[in-house]
Amino acid sequence: MTTVMRAALLAALSTVCSAALVSYPASDARFFTWSGRTVASPSGGVTFDLEGTTLDFAVANATFVGLTVVDRTPGGMRLGVYLDTVGEFGGSAADPNPAGADIPGARVSTLLTSPQQALYTLASGAQIARLSRALHVRVANLAEYSMTGSAAGGANVTVAAVVTDGVLQAAPAARPRRFLVLGDSLSSGVGSGFTIPPDGAPCGAGVALDDWSTTWNALLCANFSAACEVVAQSGVTLVADAAYNLPMSIPYALGAMGYAAWPAAERVLWTPRPVDAIFVELGENDAHAFNVTSPSGAARLAAAYVALARSLAAAYGAATPLFFVLANHEAGQSVAMALAVAELPHAALLNGTTPTLDPRSKEWIGNGCAGHPSAAQNVLAFARMQPVVAAALARR
């Protein structure tokens, strides 16, 4: 920890409260449940970089709950903080078809991390005082890793510890389902949640544009009590001649996508463990890279979809539901998806295209910043997808 970070931490701690604060290493499995790709650091922290990675824990009798973070990124990380005080966080595991997105406990804050800051407040004071039951806290990474320094080495953010004057409870149970999402900026949340203002003013840049929690896949994971394992980055392709091609073998070494700094044993993200559903939202960047509307181009992309699907089936079982997801950025990839689905008995095309006018109010919901679907459009996409996914889960 640098001198500046240490001074900031001490200053923040001195203003919190007079009660004794205790720091708990984030890798302590007695108290903390992580989902997504993580690796424990030698100091007891937990390092992560993929969007959708979450930390869950419960604390009672607290007046302050904070997080110490070691940030080595050029642009910082965007973290969403969620509090649940009614004990229903994550929805029902028994019901595969709830009526809508089940996200009790609204996001109470969004943290933009910085190398100059060590301590971040998750909850404090009247916000959590006099609670009749333990407080469930969830912290989720909302930014794609390409925005947080992965090109310079990756694995640049570590949650060192949770700091509180309360009493930590036993670690929350892992969520009963697991979804795997492979995609590009449409899946990672770039521009979503930041609808273009009427005057066309810019919405910012870098990590400040990312909000994975507003994406269709985040809503599906919340709805079905699933841990999301998201591999999505702007510009990722299947077959185009680009730096970020998605490898065609599962498991695969992530060094090809900028993860060289991760320990060798951690570069393999996908292992042959059960998943409940797989979503592939890839192909738009390929469609732009070559003429996918031609028979030869469509066949090339379809062959890549089939190769990926067969590799996934080999790792997770041929009966695992596999959805090729079509979003508003249709550039001809739907033709290739349809050709692939015709060859794959357990694959389906999941149509998430949405209008630019709200169906009820008729108001413009347009695109989010950077020309990507807005939060409202992602909600409409989720509502269209949810019954299809529920039916597939019910058949398992």
Image (spheres, rainbow, N blue to C red):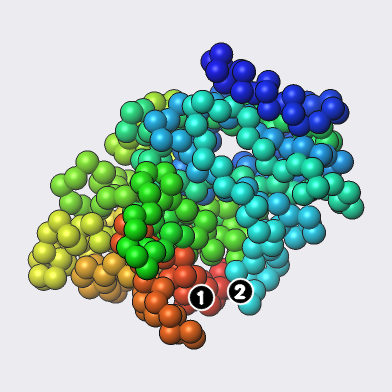
Q: Is residue 39 above or below residue 214?
A: above
Query: Which comes before the other along the chain, label 2 or label 1?
Result: 2
Q: Secondary structure at mark 1?
A: helix
Residue type for callout 1:
Ala
The residue under the point 47% across, 54% down is: 212
Q: Is residue 23 above or below residue 336?
A: above
Give the tally of numbered discs: 2
Residue type for callout 2:
Gly
Whole-percent x and y of residue 350? 40, 72
Front residue of this view, candidates 149 and 317: 149
Whole-percent x and y of residue 40? 57, 28
Quarter of the image containing the N terminus? top right
Whole-percent x and y of residue 5? 57, 21
- Bin the neighbour count of mark 2 within 10 Å (Cα to Cα): few under 14, some 14-19, many 20 and up: some
Residue at the spot of label 1: 383
Whole-percent x and y of residue 344? 33, 68
Residue 100 badge = 2
The residue under the point 72% across, 26% down is: 13
Q: Would residue 300 appear left or right of 65 to someone viewing this image? A: left
Front residue of this view, candidates 249 and 247: 247
